[in-house]
Image (cartoon, rainbow, N blue to C red):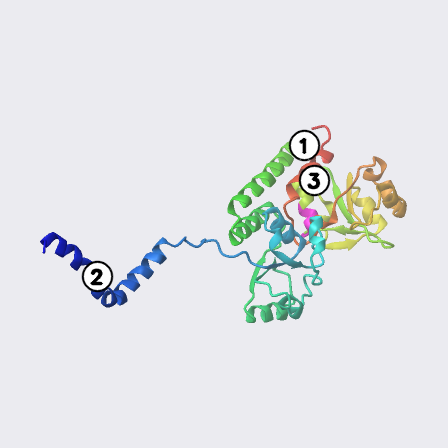
Amino acid sequence: MNKALGKKLLAPLAMAVLMPLLMPLLMPLSAMATVINAPQESSVAEEKRIISAGNGITEIIYALGAGEQLVAVDLTSNYPPQVNKLPKLGYHKQLSAEGILALKPDMLIGTDDMGPKSTITQLEMAGLEVESYGTSNSAENIHKRISSMATLLGKEEQGKALWQSISSDLKAAEELAEGKKKPKVLFLLAMEGRTPSVSGSGTEANALIKLAGGFNPAEEQFSSYKPLSNESLLIMAPDIIIYSDRGRGLTMEQLLDSQPVLKQTPAGKNARVITVDGRLLLGGLGPRTGETALNLAKAFYPES
């Protein structure tokens, strides 16, 4: 037999005999090759189901482009409009652990005054990730919240762009007020059928007045909100009045008619009365702060 022909005939025969013996050794290598050649899984974690407590927090989540991850919000969260399609879980300081856990969320994001504490403890013991942010009303805290939440949600680039827009408006507002005498500005929370409450120190409204370049004379007298006597309002003599009717559609004329003493102030006499969306002042200042501060600054300093 031709030697070359013999080798050709023996090769298939040898492989037939050896393959059953080699298969157990080759299978792990084959499996390894499959793993190596398999498409790599995305390193981005699966989007988490989120519950938000506090309108300021909710607005940031939407502004970062993560609104679709929300499965429920608290009662103060009513902006942007699409948030009102979500279940509401009560006031952010009176949350129910049972109601939250029933929605099977992965994360609760809110402010450090959400509660009660017993509910937060119960949620954490149940394995829910809870993230809370300070309610300090300053530009620095807005920046901190946006930056931290952007990292938490994997939206770092969106967070940078959002803060750049806000800080640009705040800078423009600051420039309008630069070198000018600050007007006296009072913020009134108009409550139907009752005397309006005036914002003092430690409130979102007071911070907004400062960011817009105004001076709140009530800041030096009390904190939080307080109804004032007619005499006190006249003594403060605000140049400008800002008010929120919490979405009831109260006009400037209706406000002045319901509180005649306001007509005797410089603000009332000169019709320098401005309404703002009260949702801006719930759950800490949020993404619309820069735009609102700039608009107020333009009203404070029309000559600029």
Q: Secondary structure at mark 2?
A: helix
Please state the horizontal and vertical placement of residue 284, each as a whole percent of the image: 65, 52
Query: Looking at the image, is 72 positioned above or below residue 285?
Result: below
Magenta stretch: includes residue 255: no
Residue at 73% of width from left, 30% of height from top? 302
Mark earlier in primary sequence (1, 2): 2
The x and y percentages for residue 167 are 59, 39
Q: Residue 203 lies in magenta, yes or no?
A: yes
Per the image, the residue denoted by label 1 is 180
Q: Please give left or right for residue 236 compared with residue 97 in the image.
A: right
Q: Can you give x and y, in whole percent of width and height, for residue 239 in the image?
A: 78, 38
Question: Element at badge 1?
Answer: loop
Q: Specify start and end residues of the magenta stretch as a single range.
A: 202-207
**Number of numbered callouts drawn:** 3
> What's the amino acid at mark 3?
Gly
Using the image, determine if residue 66 lies above or below residue 106: above
User: Upstream in the sequence, badge 3 or badge 2?
Assistant: 2
| In this rendering, the label closer to the viewer, 1 or 2 | 2
Name the residue that disc number 2 marks: 15
User: Are discs 3 and 2 less than 8 Å apart at CB?
Assistant: no
Instruction: Classify the position of the C terminus by image quarter.
Output: top right
* First-in-chain label (3 vs 1): 1
Q: Quadrant of the N terminus?
A: bottom left
Q: Residue at x 83, y 46 (%)?
A: 249
Q: State the residue position of label 3.
A: 214
Q: Amino acid at mark 1?
A: Lys
Query: Which of 176 and 133 lies nearest the eye of the viewer?
Result: 133
> Would you place residue 64 above or below residue 46 in this image?
above
Distance (Cα) linking label 3 and label 2: 90 Å
